[in-house]
Amino acid sequence: MPFLWISKNGGNWSEFSLDGMNRDQLELTTDIERMRLQRCGEGWVVLFSPEILASANGLPCELRLLADRDEIVCWPIAERESHFRMIYSAERLATIRPFQRAQGAGVVFCARCRQPVAEGEPAVVCPRCGAPYHSSADWPCWTHGPQCNCCNQSTAPATDLSWTPEDL
Ligand SMILES: [Zn+2]
Ligand SMILES: [Zn+2]
């Protein structure tokens, strides 16, 4: 699920999750700026208010369909010394959900222990490749290894993102 990393006036990065947003529109208001995010298919479009100057990856913009790792900088026209930096990460996170077989699929096997994953059982579906894993206290198959058995997706907990703006 997508994230925004936000830093005001060069301060620490804070993370703003767009996960689980059932709304198609949200308003991001801080003391520095005001912008609107509008859902567009799987992604988000960001629109700035007229009193804001903004750039996306160094080029002036008024609105933008956010792409992974886009860097947006904006500042109020009236107050050039304050600015607001934001990086969009489309990275999706592994979440534990009751397992749901795809329609018409037969028995599905855990990519770690090779045992069947039952309908409704707590499971993680690898966000990168879709491989299913048991994910209960008794069967912690997802976190049993450092990464997915089928791709290189990290199994670290959701708070421990595999990419942060410090990597830039
Ligand atoms: Zn398993
Ligand atoms: Zn995987």
Image: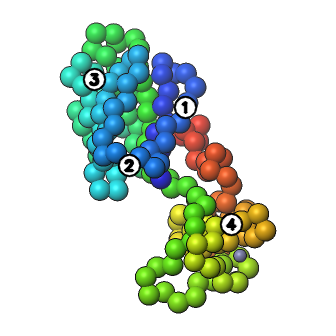
Residue at coordinates 64% horizontally, 79% vertically from top-left? Answer: 117
- Color scheme of the displayed model: rainbow
Say whether disc 3 or disc 2 marks the residue closer to the N-terminus.
Answer: 2
C-alpha distance separating marks 2 and 4:
25 Å
The picture places residue 125, in percent across and down from the top left corner, at: 57, 68
Number of numbered discs visible in the structure rendering: 4
Residue at coordinates 48% horizontally, 31% vertically from top-left? Answer: 6
Viewer-nearest of discs 2 and 1: 2
Say whether disc 2 or disc 1 marks the residue closer to the N-terminus.
Answer: 1
Look at the image and tell me whether residue 151 can be seen: no
C-alpha distance separating marks 1 and 3:
22 Å
Q: Which amino acid does label 4 sit on?
A: Ser
Q: Which amino acid does label 2 sit on?
A: Asn
Q: What element carries label 2?
A: loop
Can you identify the residue that label 3 sits on?
A: 53
Q: What element carries label 1?
A: strand
C-alpha distance separating marks 2 and 1:
22 Å
The picture places residue 22, in percent across and down from the top left corner, at: 38, 49
Image quarter of the C terminus: top right
Q: Considering only vertical position in the picture, is 150 above or below 165? A: below
Q: Are marks 3 and 2 in contact (CB under 8 Å)?
A: no
